[in-house]
Image (spheres, rainbow, N blue to C red):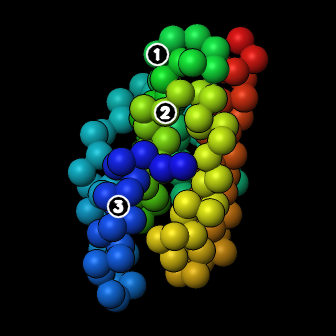
Amino acid sequence: MATEAFEEIAETFEFLDDWEDRYRHVIELGRAMPAMDDALKSPATKVEGCASQVWIQPLLDGEGASARFDFQGDSDAMIVRGLIAVLHGLYSGLTIADVRRVDAMAELARLGLDEHLSSQRSNGLRAMVARIETVAAQAAAD
């Protein structure tokens, strides 16, 4: 299960033959993301387990499992900011129930990220996914 935005990212990755081009594309996705307000960059939104500074601020429209999920995110590293943009493409606009059904690691594997990221970046990506999954679980329980 993936959003239309994520499918577009996956199609672009299929078109780009070289990992260097894919890497640049991820960075461009990060640059195109709206800036996160500095006031939201707090310990409450900081994602632990990332080598870089990473913040994710969930945005829910509605309540419970039918609430629509979105988030703002930012990082001090351009490639990580790009990974946040990829996750935004994967999750944004889904209901909380659908967010909980996404197999993020399988979807991200379609992009080949698991083969080309350093272990630190992979750990950070898993930490970001875990944060989103935790938010979804808490929202579903409300």
Tell me residue 56's x, y (percent). Answer: 52, 38
Q: Which residue is painted at 54% across and 18% down in the image? A: 67
Q: At numbered mark 3, what does the secondary structure look like: helix, strand or loop?
A: helix
Give the residue number, with chain letter if any, for mark 3: 9
User: Label 2 near label 3: C-beta < 8 Å?
Assistant: no
Q: Is residue 124 visible?
A: no
Say the numbered circle drawn on residue 61: 1
Residue under label 2: 94
Mark 3: few/some/many CA within 10 Å (<14, 14-19, 20+): many
Closer to the N terminus: mark 3 or mark 1? 3
Looking at marks 2 and 1 on the same chain, the residue that comes earlier in the sequence is marked by 1
Q: Amino acid at mark 3?
A: Ile
Q: Identify the amino acid type marked 2.
A: Leu
State the CA–CA distance, disc 2 to disc 1: 10 Å
From mark 3 to mark 1, how far is it between C-alphas? 25 Å
Task: Please tell me whether residue 57 is drawn above or below residue 125 in the rendered image.
Answer: above
